Amino acid sequence: MRMEIHDGVRRREENGVVRRVVAVGALAMVLSGGCALAQAPGAANAQTGQPGSLQSPTPEQQQGLPSVGPLTAEQARAAAEKVDSSLPDLPVPPPINGAQVPMPAAGSASLEGAANDKTEPARDQVTGLRPNFLGFLGPYRRAYVPPLFPGNGERLNGLIRDGKLYISLHDALALVIEDNLEVQVERYNLQLAETDVVRAAGGGSTRGVDYNIAESPAGVGGPGSPLLNSSQTSTNPITPTIDDLTSLNSTAVTENSLSETGTQLYSAGPNIPYFDPSLVGEAGYLQRSDIVTIGGDTGTGTGTGSSASGNAATPGTLRYVSTNIAYLEGFSTGTQLEATVNNDSQVIYGSASQYNPFSTPTTSVTVTQPLLRGFGRGVNLRYLRIANLNRKVSHLLFEQQLIDTIYGTSRLYYDLVSLGENVAVKEEALRAARKLYDDDRDQVEVGALAPIELTRAQALVSSSEFDLVQAQGLYRQQEVILRNELIRPGVAAFHTPFTSIIPTDRITVPETLEPLNVEALEAEALANRPDLAQAHLQVKTGEISVQGSRNNALAQLNVYGNVQTRGSTEQNYEPLGSSAAAGNGAITIPQNLALGGLRTATIYQAGVQVTLPLRNRIAQADAARDTIQLRQSAARAERFEDQVREETENAVIALQTAQAAYDAAVASRGYQQQLLDAERDKLAMGQSTNLLVIQNEAYLAQAKSTEIVARSNWEKARIALDRALGNLLEKNRITLDDAINGHTN
């Protein structure tokens, strides 16, 4: 057993439990009636914020008090033990967990289900993005994106009665899921990910998803708010403390980026084939007139021809339509196919003109296969793999946005509950002050009390009225913040007007806190947190991008084969496909492959094309930089794991501390009530003063406000623990699919 005395409070620790004992001298002063409590037990000092201590009475407080002799040592010790036995036991904070819980190999079943969920929001779903195969014009119609959902008042109207919104926490969360704009923005992120999947399937590069998560406003009941400040004890209870309610930064919505790469992007890597087949057609009118060489005969002609003796050709005019048709397609192995049909060569370069140029069209088919740069499905399907991972990321981001919004809304809701309870306390304090004033007025009228005491009572009434006005102002401000979180502006046209919000749920603190296994909770958090899971998926997308940048550092080695009929030799090879750097998916239109050559020929070609950058510094630097960025992302993800462990452990400590603080606040309020009752009894017997009663009434009101704050802090600590564990959706009976579709049961 260990015992020590510090700041007038004796602490005794036995069997891991700390119990507080009021110092003998201070207790003797209280029992003797020789002083009033300058602060409620456990309340913080208004100036220093330190735990309050017992203070000696002032000479004014001692006026009119009977002289009482000091207690004996035995009496003081017995009284101290009696008080000690009635105080709650405070748990000793557990030591920190030195051995960190390892990251599980796989996430929980619910997290895996959320990542693999392909549900799309029904009311916001894009149509026409994947046209029907039989609908020939489908690919050329613009996809339809529904307008922004304006909201509706169906659920809201059922909660409004007599011009007031009576709402439970579950109803509040249902309204948030349906109408909250931050949730709606993240719902659109799901559709962005789907467009990337379609884009990558056609051979385009991905455009990415939005990693920003919006945090709900803090409200007026958060840390450092006037609610907490007003619970402090004032040295002069009849002089109110003014809180500036116009300087609160309580309505700002902040955004946090969960991107593991930040503004640094991976390099584009090698071009990938254009997977969507393309048909290119070209037709044009051409007129050719033959001329007569110098020294030749002049004449006219109607067609084509040349003199057998080599003289100049007979002048003539030829009119015809030229055509050029090409088919292009790329494949995931890197293979590219190009086929063309045209009639240009016979007319332009032939030795004789023809009236029917389509009689001998030129055809050409070319197949190209990269062997180094751009080879293989792993490189050419990298954007599609990244898009599929980003689709999982978008669902995890949506779940994280839901968790953060539910957390923020729950805090705002329970702060409104606490602010309403605080208003009730201020109203009760005002009623007590008015009753005291009425009683004092009656005594002054009969000459039993000095008029100055009536002035003190009137000052207490004015101070209580001021406290009530500030408490009501805080409540109204919180109503506005919560309303904007629940209801978007466009919903006003759909619901019945209401003038105030009445929360129907109350905060209930259990008598004892259930045992909390920190290691088990950390393991649960690591397996359940969607923000951590999406961070690891970002590392995987980085690995895919690094594979592409490393492949781009290889030399370009292609083999090709070409077959032509009635054409000329093949043009130099030109890469087709989507430019990864531009990422716009535009194809490279082929040149006319048959310009010149023999009139009648079948040509077979095959060859190798090599492009060898002699220093290759750009590609090497990109590959090295991308690898460094990948290492950075992995380090950030590992740091994120540490943050999850830290948040979980701190949330456990916060909940345990909040439980102990609430127990102490309840005990403090009970003792303050006893002191007030005793002071009133002594006043009735003429053994106390009106000032002491006024002080104790003010202290009791402050002790009740402190209890309200402690209860609110406990509830928010519990919600914070659920948030750290990633199970807020489960605790509030919300399914991800319902939330995606904008409704809940």
Image: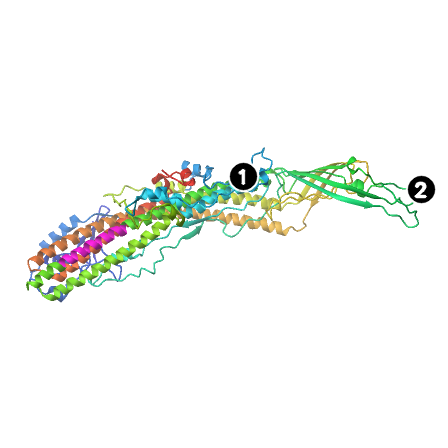
Mark 2: secondary structure: loop
Work out whether 12 lies above or below 105.
below
- Colour treatment of the image: rainbow
Is residue 432 located in the magenta-colored stretch of the structure?
A: yes
Look at mark 2 in the image and give the residue it sits on.
309
Residue 48 falls in image quadrant: bottom left
Q: Is residue 382 left or right of residue 720?
A: right
Look at mark 1 in the image and give the residue it sits on.
128
Residue plotted at (92% across, 40% down): 308
Q: Where in the figure is residue 106, as x and y percent of width and height?
A: 44, 38
Amino acid type of the residue tagged 2 in the rendering: Ser
Is residue 154 located in the magenta-colored stretch of the structure?
A: no
Residue 737 falls in image quadrant: top left
Judged from this view, the residue extending furthest toward the top is: 134
Instruction: Give the alpha-carbon distance from disc 1 to disc 2, as whole Å.
Output: 66 Å
Which mark is on residue 325?
none
Q: Quadrant of the C terminus?
A: top left
Q: Where in the figure is residue 113, as x and y percent of width and height?
A: 43, 36
Mark 1: secondary structure: loop
Amino acid type of the residue tagged 1 in the rendering: Gly
Q: Where in the figure is residue 140, as x and y percent of width and height?
A: 59, 40
State whether the magenta stretch is mostly helix, strand or loop. Answer: helix
Res. 98 visible in picture: no
Give the magenta range. 418-436
Mark 1 neighbour density, 10 Å: few (under 14) some (14–19) many (20 or more) = some
Upstream in sequence: badge 1 or badge 2: 1
Q: Where in the figure is residue 715, as x and y percent of width and height?
A: 29, 47
